[in-house]
Image (tube, rainbow, N blue to C red):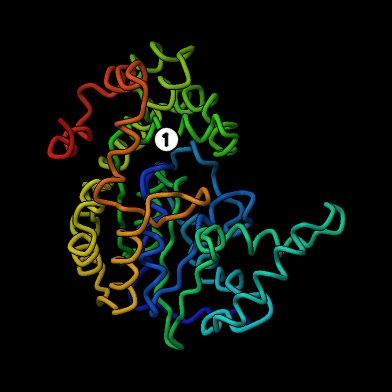
Amino acid sequence: MIDTRAHSRGPVFVLGTQRSGTTWLANIFDSHRDLLFYYEPFARDHGGITNFPDEFAYVDPPYERLAKSLRVQIPALLRFRSRFFDPVTLTEAQFRREVWLMRKLVGLPGRIRPGYAARYVGMQANRLAQSPPIHFSKSSGANRIVIKEVRLYFKIALLAAAFPTARFVHVVRHPCAVVGSMLNYLQKGRLVELKSQIPFFIGRVRAQGHFDRYDTYFERYANGSLAEQLALFWRVTNEEMLEQFLPLGERVQTVVYEDLAQRPLDTVRRVFGACEISMDPVTERYVRESSSKSPQRQTELDTTRESATYYRRWCDTTPPDVIDTVNRVCEGSPVTRMFDAYYD
């Protein structure tokens, strides 16, 4: 039976673009024993949230129909946490058995591969992609929902209307680091969804009247290079998030990734306090361990790193022509001012 216990406090949404550090912060939330975390349930392939507008669609009010659907579907995500055991108090032994079984099922030929196995793996990718997979123990009273998504940057007003007590965490990272990392991963055949979607970004948002203020940029970069299109994607999405967050006041916490990397515990304590979440000893230990390990990445979503030095990696290794491109596209953006303290 799906546990749809009422939540006196609304969900926490961890939002940002790909390669901004959202997965690391999401794992920090997930490590808390009283929080139920869901990894990118709005991804169409995951099948967590259905009948929802596509990633590039801006949603105008009224929000009643979509808000009602979200209030039903989000608590029901609990069914994706475990297929065969308790979805809340799953032990580590049960977790490892279930991961082994689900991976075997996902490896079956397409015609006989169970859909629930693919959904399980996709919705828990943040933990399963670690080496070895991470198990975060949960208390029997865990019922505060945390959702990490990279597809909701145009849907914040809708989310705020659907969940009046929700909290929002906006993770933002230097555009040169983000675009440099994106290009690197795309060249390696990763970020498959982004690769398929980015050629349509300018056309889709340009066709919506809400984004008229970017017409000059759309015209200039409609046939631009991949680096130009990714930089414009970073600019438009992050500026739009800042604008939609303004009316929400204290319900929003902006996390500069570079600040999280240099002062992880202080940053997490600030964010948790704003979200009315107590600091858990297990979470504190996870923050310390995940921010001070070798920066050698074993998997795409491996979030252990020597964070105090790792945060500069992409800016230091991105080719100068790409950096020039990103700086040109993002020049004058209010978001870029957040990084002055971290880069020369």
> Which residue is depicted at the point 51% across and 63% down?
127
> Which residue is depicted at the point 36% across and 44% down?
20
**Res. 31 image quadrant:** bottom left
**Residue closer to the observer: 276 or 214:** 276
Location of residue 251 in the rendering, given as x and y in whole percent from the top left corner: 24, 60
**Residue closer to the observer: 34 or 340:** 340
**Res. 27 image quadrant:** bottom left
Q: Secondary structure at mark 1?
A: helix
Q: In the visual, does 262 lie left or right of 232?
A: left
Q: In the visual, does 250 lie left or right of 18?
A: left
Total count of labels:
1
Location of residue 196 in the rendering, given as x and y in whole percent from the top left corner: 60, 31
Residue count near mark 1 (Cα–Cα under 10 Å), binned few <14, some 14–19, many ≥20:
many
On screen, residue 294 above or below 73: above
Please state which amino acid type lies under the numbered disc 1. Ser
Q: Where does the N terminus fall, quadrant-wise?
A: bottom right
Location of residue 172 in the rendering, given as x and y in whole percent from the top left corner: 29, 43
Q: Residue furthest left?
A: 341
On screen, residue 6 above or below 232: below
On screen, residue 23 above or below 220: below
Q: Residue furthest right?
A: 111
Q: Which residue is mark 1?
A: 181
> Which residue is depicted at the point 51% across and 51% down?
298
Location of residue 272 in the rendering, given as x and y in whole percent from the top left corner: 25, 68
**Residue closer to the observer: 310 or 268:** 310
> Which residue is depicted at the point 36% across and 65% down?
28
Q: Where does the C terminus fall, quadrant-wise?
A: top left
Q: In the visual, does 264 lie left or right of 229?
A: left
